[in-house]
Image: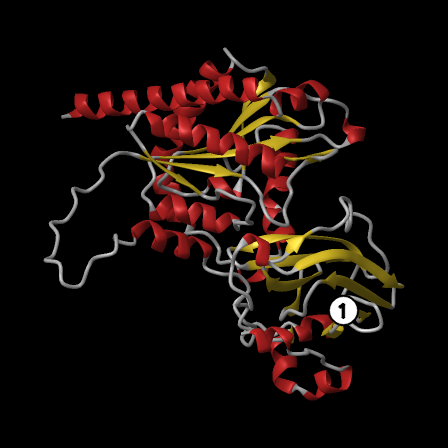
Amino acid sequence: MASRANHRVLLSCGLLCAAALLCSQGAVGGVSDGQPSKPMGASRFPVASDARLAGDGKQTRFILDLDQTISFRAFPLADPYRVVVDLPQLSFQLPADVGSAGRGLIKAFRYGLVMPGGSRIVFDLTGPARIANAYVLEAANGQPPRLVLELEEVDRTTFVQSLSADGRPELRPAIADARDATVALPAKVEEAAPPKPAAAPDLRPVVVIDPGHGGPDNGTQSGSENEKSLVLGFGLALRDRIEKSGKYRVVMTRTDDTFIPLSDRVRIARNQSAALFVSIHADALPRHEGDAQGATIYTLSDRASDVEAERLAEAENKADAIGGVNLTEEPTDVADILIDLAQRETRTFSNRFARLLMGDMKTTTRMHKHPLKSAGFRVLKAPDVPSVLIELGYVSNKDDLEHLVSENWRSRTVGSVAHAIDTFFAKRLATAGAGN
Ligand SMILES: [Zn+2]
C-alpha cells in the first residue's frame, strides 16, 4: 500500500485525450477504487494544509497542498455545473473561509467527509467547463505534494458530451446500505459454538433522528457557527434523552460530520420501518430579507403553506447539489399513486406529531410567529413513515443563535421534543388498543 501511496500520479493532457476509456467515463485521476491508501486512524490521515485558485474565466487552476501524495478521481456533474473530486479521507486544515470566494470558472468550493475513509471537494462552476488536467505532484523544489486540477471553458454541448452516464464510476457510496449492514450484522459467532437461540425481536418503535447536512454541506452559517454541527449536537442529545427511557430503538442518519444524501436519509427511515422520523435543522434569512426568529415545525405538502416555507424547502432540497450528488441519476421517488394512498394516513400522523411538538416546544422555546408550516421537503417523503422537520431557530438572528449554542437551551428543548415523542407514542398505542 505504501508504494501505491507514493506512486506518482501524473496525467498529461495529451495522455488524457488519448485515454478514450478514461474520457468516456468522464472521470480523471489516479487510482479509481476510491479506497484510502493508508490505514485509518485519526492521526494517519493525509493532511491538506492550503488551497488556492489561479487563472481566469478561460482556464482556472485549483491547487491543494498535501503532506503526501494521494490517489483521487475527478468528474464533472451537470445542472448545476459542478466538478467533484473524491479523495481518501483527509484531515482538512485549511484557512477558515477558503472556497467561499471563487475565481475564473470556479464560483466557490467546499469539502468534507462523505463516508468513512472518503473525503470530497465539490466545486460550483460559473458555467460549463472540462477537466483539462488533474494530477498529483510529489514534493519538489521546496513545495509540498500538491493536487492540481485544471479546468477549461467549453460550451454546453461539449460539457454534456463529457458526461457519459453509463461508464461513470459509482458516484457515491451506498452509505445507507453500509449502515444498515452494520445495524443488522449479527454478533461474532464462534465457529465451534452451537447455534444460539435467536434473540427476541426488538419490537420497540424505531425513531429515526436526522441531523441535517454534514461533510461538504455546512447548511446555514453565522460566523464560525455551522448548522451542520449545531443540529448534530442537538440530534445526539435527543438520542441520548429518548434512549434512556428504553421505550424506543433510536437510529441516527449520521453521528459525525459526514454528508448523507437526502434519499439515503429517507431510505434509512424506510429500511428500519421507522415509526417516526425527525429531521433537525436551523434556518437563516438572507441579510436583505430582514429578521426572523423562533422555531418552526414543518410537515410535507405538495403546496407550500407560504412563501417562506417554499423558500426554505427549496434551500433544504439543495443539499444534494451542495454535497456533489449527481441529481440527474437520482431515482424519482416511489410512484406518485403509491405515495398518495399511503401518505394519507402517514400525513395524519405527521400532522398530529407536529401539533404535539408545538404544544411542548412552546413551553421551553421561542417559536416562530407561524410555527406550523408545510412544503415539499424531499427528506420528508417516506410514504409510510410519519415525518417532521424542525427548524430550531435562525442562525441569522442574534438571540436565536445565542440559544442554539447554549447547553442549557438545548437541554430544555431536547426535553420538550422527547416529551412530545412520548405523548405521540402513548396516544398511538392507546388508539391501537381501543381498536382491538
Ligand atoms: Zn438545513
Estimate how packed mark 1 is, as few (under 14), some (14 to 19) or many (20 or more) residues with alpha carbons within 10 Å: some
Residue 226 place in picture, x, y as percent: 66, 36
Relative side of 429 to 371, left or right? left
Q: Which amino acid does label 1 sit on?
A: Val
Describe residue 177's horizontal placement relative to residue 316 as left or right: left
Q: Is residue 376 above or below residue 63?
A: above
- Decide which of 10, 28 is in the foreground and name it: 10
Q: Mark 1 points at which residue?
A: 148
The answer to whether residue 303 of the structure is visible from this angle is no
Q: What element carries label 1?
A: strand
42 vs 145, left or right, is left
Seen at 72% across and 79% down, the residue is 10
Q: How is the image coloured?
A: secondary structure
x and y percentages locating residue 315 in the rendered image:
64, 40
Q: Position of residue 150 (x, y in %)?
A: 79, 70
Q: Can residue 177 be seen in this view?
A: yes
